[in-house]
Image: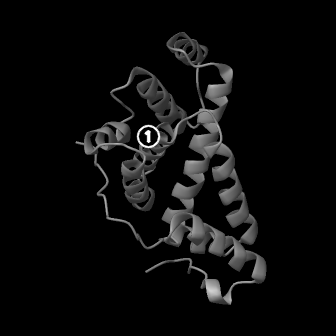
Amino acid sequence: MPRINPVNPEKADAKTAATLQAVKKKLGVLPNIFTTFAQSPAALNSYVQLGECLAGGRLTARQREQVALAVAQENACQYCLSAHAAIGQGAGLSDEDIERARTGGATDAMDNLITLFALKVARSRGEISDADIAAVRQGGLDDGLVVEIIANVALNVMTNYLNKVAGTEIDFPVVELQTAA
């Protein structure tokens, strides 16, 4: 049972209802994360707008989903892990790709570098060393991509925390969290 109740779109104020309707039109469904965010129209709009801005960035949909999976697993957010496993499949990730991303890896060298760096940022809460930056630059990331990866990590941390605090009901095929051995 959710700790923060989702907003019924039919009872939302006009602006929030319009935002939720636009999300439903774009996605074909209205995931619970959006109706939970709708408790704060400012938070809902910032989430939608940041996601749209980052979708227009240099990271591919596949890379963004790999980052989301790594961050969701790191933060133990089952809602986001389940959502991004489903969305990741739509972005072309195989089951193996999804499993690798959850641990900060990928088969493609650039995807691997991006996913590992994102996981390091999330795990260290941004405490990245000069050596870490030198390594990603040597691997082919420029400062713009580093900043974009950080922005994607931040977006996913926000959703992880919201869904964990809210107890958002999972409305995707459920993916179990990996636990430490």
Using the rendered image of the protein, determine whether residue 166 is visible from the camera's viewpoint: no
> Which of 122/60 is in front?
60
Q: Position of residue 162 (x, y in %)?
A: 56, 63
Image x and y of residue 23, in percent: 61, 67
Of 40 and 21, the residue lying toward us? 21
Q: Residues within 10 Å of mark 1 (few under 14, many from 20)?
A: many
Q: Determine the residue positioned at 72% across, 58% down.
A: 46
The quadrant of the rendering that contains the N terminus is: bottom left
Q: Is residue 122 above or below residue 110?
A: below
Q: Which residue is mark 1?
A: 66
Is 82 positioned to the left or the right of 6 in the image?
Answer: left
Disc 1 marks which amino acid?
Answer: Gln
Report the coloring of the rendering: one colour
Above or below for 138 versus 8 = above
**Camera-nearest residue between 123 and 35:** 35
Quadrant for the C terminus, please: top left
Q: Position of residue 141 (x, y in %)?
A: 57, 19
Q: Residue furthest bottom?
A: 11
On the picture, is 102 further left or further right than 14? left
Q: Residue at x 67, y 89 (%)?
A: 11
What count of labels does the image hold? 1
In the displayed structure, 162 sits above or below 116; it is below
Residue drawn at 43 percent across, 46 percent down: 91
